[in-house]
Image (cartoon, grey):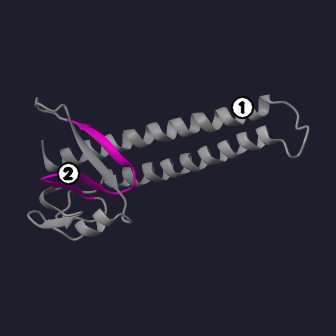
Amino acid sequence: MTRQQRRIQIITSCLEQQKQLAATAKQEMESAQQQSNEYGANVDRYDSYRTKMMRSRDMYAKQLSNANAGIRVLQELLNHTPFETAEHGAIVITNRQNFFLSIGAGKFLVPHNAPQDIPQETFFAISAQTPIYMALKGKKQGDSIIFNGTTQTITEIL
């Protein structure tokens, strides 16, 4: 598998996770709206149940908006060629962990193409505001960082 194909595989896995988050948020938002609508006529302007449902709807709407923004960023990164240094959009593989410097999406799994003992690799999608991102920024393959008292050496950047 080429570096570009590997990069696309990793980004696609992260993108699928974001799409699932967006779908869940949309479903929950619509459910909260439906529950509020089915509750009946507004009998009291201080109706706590309706207020609770509207707050839930608004919370899920914000989550949906954030997930959709993340999807747009990831789709743009699909077209980018592999990086040589750790910067926004790069995939950084160290001897201890795998990072995708993009959005704060957290942990996601990427399936292996070749048969190996571990069927999936774990990656962490991290945003530019995280301390580990700051430690990795600008580094190249072979460079090391010390984070939380642990030394990590960059083995590959995609």
Mark sitting on residue 80 = none
Residue 155 percent across, percent down from the top left: 10, 56
Residue 129 percent across, percent down from the top left: 39, 66
Rounded to the nearest whole Å, what is the CA distance between mark 1 and mark 2? Answer: 43 Å
Report the front residue among 86 and 75: 86
Residue most toward the right?
Answer: 43
Question: Mark 2 = which residue?
Answer: 97
Question: Mark 1 = which residue?
Answer: 34
Residue 99 left/right relative to 104 = left
Q: Name the image quarter holding residue 148.
A: bottom left
Q: Earlier in the sequence, mark 1 or mark 2?
A: 1
> Could you tell me if residue 85 is visible in this image?
no
Residue most toward the left?
Answer: 142
Report the front residue among 144 and 8: 144
Q: Amino acid at mark 1?
A: Gln
Dominant SS in magenta: strand
Residue 60 left/right relative to 141 = right
As displayed, is residue 49 above or below residue 147? above
Q: Quadrant of the N terminus?
A: top left
> Could you tell me if residue 21 is visible in this image?
yes
Q: Amino acid at mark 2?
A: Gln
Secondary structure of the residue carrying numbered label 2: loop
Highlighted magenta segment, given as a residue range: 90-111
Q: In the image, is residue 128 part of the stretch drawn in magenta?
A: no
Q: Residues within 10 Å of mark 2 (few under 14, many from 20)?
A: some
Residue 138 left/right relative to 45 = left
Which of labels 1 and 2 is toward the front?
2
Q: Name the image quarter holding residue 136.
A: bottom left
The residue that appears at 88% across and 46% down in the rendered structure is: 45
Residue 125 percent across, percent down from the top left: 33, 52
